[in-house]
Image (tube, rainbow, N blue to C red):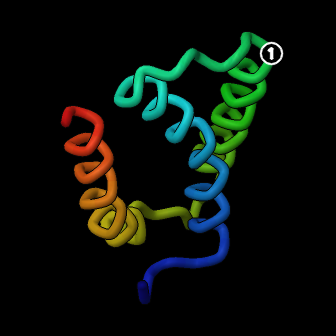
């Protein structure tokens, strides 16, 4: 986590609700969020994309560590939903 800065965690944290909503819908077969909720999650996604595109010092090095930490959790969620 030597390359992670506060902005990296803010971007990752702002995408978490969208990823959770998609995971619950896909793996747990929960109903999709309402249109208004999904629209607000997409607006947040657009803001994070705009931030990443406009920040010249932003790098994806820190996201490698976050992916390495969160990938086992996602695999566990997927395998639990199948059984």
Find residue 23 and report its image quarter.
top left
Residue at image point 23% right, 50% down: 75
Vertical placement of residue 18 versus 13, above or below: above
| Element at label 1 | helix
Horizontally, residue 52 falls left or right of residue 71, namely: right
Expressed as whole percent of the image width and height from the top left, the position of residue 28 reads 40, 29
Expressed as whole percent of the image width and height from the top left, the position of residue 21 reads 56, 32
- Residue found at the far bottom of this picture: 2
Residue at image point 62% right, 57% down: 13
Q: Residues within 10 Å of mark 1 (few under 14, many from 20)?
A: few
Residue picked out by circle 1: 36
- Residue found at the far front of this picture: 83
Horizontally, residue 59 falls left or right of residue 32, namely: left
Horizontally, residue 60 falls left or right of residue 33, namely: left
The one nearer the camera, 82 or 25, is: 82
Total numbered circles: 1
Residue at image point 59% right, 67% down: 9
The one nearer the camera, 41 or 25, is: 25
Expressed as whole percent of the image width and height from the top left, the position of residue 72 reads 25, 60
- Residue found at the far top of this picture: 35
Quadrant into which the C terminus falls = top left
Quadrant into which the N terminus falls = bottom left
Vertical placement of residue 79 versus 24, above or below: below
Horizontally, residue 81 falls left or right of residue 59, namely: left
Find residue 39 and report its image quarter.
top right
Find residue 73 and report its image quarter.
bottom left
Expressed as whole percent of the image width and height from the top left, the position of residue 4 reads 50, 78
Residue at image point 21% right, 32% down: 82
């Amino acid at each position: 986590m030597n390359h992670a800065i506060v902005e990296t965690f803010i971007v990752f944290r702002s995408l978490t609700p969208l990823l959770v909503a998609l995971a619950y819908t896909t793996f747990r077969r929960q109903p999709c969020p309402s249109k208004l909720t999904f629209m607000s999650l997409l607006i947040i996604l657009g803001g994070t994309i705009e931030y990443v595109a406009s920040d010249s010092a932003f790098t994806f090095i820190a996201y490698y560590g976050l992916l390495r930490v969160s990938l086992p959790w996602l695999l566990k969620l997927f395998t639990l939903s199948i059984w």
